[in-house]
Image: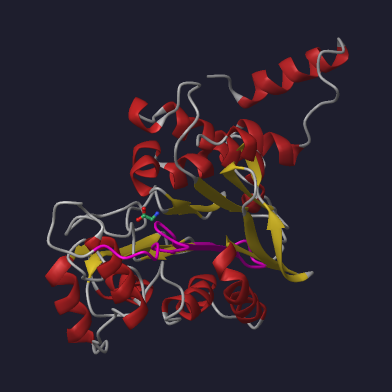
Amino acid sequence: MIDRRAFLEKSALLSALGFLPRALSAEEYERDVMGSPVGTMPNFRGRPCVVSSANGINGVKVAYDRIRGGIDPLDAIIAGVNLVELDPDDQSVGLGGLPNEEGVVQLDASCMHGPSRRAGAVGCLEDIATPSLVAKAVMDYTTHVLLVGPGARKFAVALGFRTQNLLTEKSRQDWLRWKSRLSKNDNWLDHDDDVKINWTHGTINMNAVNAAGDVSSVTTTSGLAWKLDGRLGDSPIHGAGQYTDNDVGAAGSTGLGEINIKACGGFLTVEFMRNGATPEQAALKTLERMVHVTEPRLLDQRGRPRYDIQVYAVAKDGRYGAATMYEGASFAVCDERGPRLEPCAYLFKTADRPR
Ligand code: GLY
């Protein structure tokens, strides 16, 4: 460890010798060396910003407008992801989400509220379309952080959440066609039409910061399509599917959750930002770590992953970024320039994707 005085003396010396381009400003020093972000500096003024997976393009505008209207960032982004949870046509989240192997829709969600340092989550929740709100209720009304399965459902019903059948006819038909193709030797007749499904491990992650530099994050999903009954992905896991540290920023992920759980992707991205990386650099470094923790069966002969995953991040000062394993994905952002899709940075070119 190097104390502040020694650091300043050393950096001044190195700077004088030409090894450093210039001495760090006090702000850079606090952020890069002491690990304290710019937001803890006196006179800090943030820049509101909302960032999410591409399927949140409408939600980021809803969230941003609410933040500008003075609504708490977590409430604002939950309103943003509710749009997607309640959209029966998005088969990766909430109502209409693709079911598990038994044809049952099981939802996962988690959230973190930076200013109060609180967190909530639910996993394998059935019959309730807005798990993000149930996750927040766990945070608001209990001493717990994560409720799963029938207990999570019971808790939500006790609070007045409406139950409904989440399996839309479209998702039921997709599930039936998937099931009928499991084996050539089973008793299901094969059909000529192929199963065309856009999302098999889609999700929505949304992160936001307001003008005061207060940060929050939320992730919600129906998880991996056709998963085993009881499978939890990364979305309900704090530090994986999303993570917030109000001193630094927030980050979250979409894509193959099993990899993200092992890499602690949300937490890692925030820690990279704490150590000075920009949101985009932090997201790319987290993807590199994900490749590093991937088991051989999910890598090709050149060590390239056979899966895709995206990381989204926002810093306390309003900078943002996102990265994806393979070129081509975009992400949604809304700030003073309005809602838009931007291309994710990437680790590998599309041409290098394993066939
Ligand atoms: N990232 C969503 C999941 O794997 O469940």
Does any portion of residue 146 appear in the rendered image? no
Furthest-top residue in this view: 17
Q: Is residue 202 magenta?
A: yes
- Identify the image quadrant of residue 353: top right
Place of residue 194 in the rendered image (x, y in percent of width and height, measured from the top left): 40, 62
Above or below, 181 relative to 134: above
The main secondary structure of the magenta stretch is loop
Ligand 1 - quadrant of the structure image: bottom left
In this rendering, position of residue 185 left or right of residue 35: left
Q: Nearer the viewer, residue 275 or 326?
A: 326
Q: Is residue 2 magenta?
A: no
**Residue at 59% across / 23% down in the picture?**
3
Does any portion of residue 100 appear in the rendered image? yes
Q: Nearer the viewer, residue 248 or 228?
A: 228
Is the image coloured rainbow, by chain, by secondary structure, or in one colour?
secondary structure
Q: Nearer the viewer, residue 341 or 4?
A: 341
- Look at the image and give the residue range highlighted in magenta: 190-216
Above or below, 294 relative to 125: above
Tally of marks: 0
Place of residue 216 in the rendered image (x, y in percent of width and height, measured from the top left): 50, 63
**Residue at 44% across / 37% down in the picture?**
306
Place of residue 12 in the rendered image (x, y in percent of width and height, measured from the top left): 80, 19
- Identify the image quadrant of residue 7: top right
- Identify the image quadrant of residue 200: bottom left
In this rendering, position of residue 334 left or right of residue 59: right
Q: Nearer the viewer, residue 218 or 300?
A: 300
Place of residue 75 in the rendered image (x, y in percent of width and height, measured from the top left): 48, 76
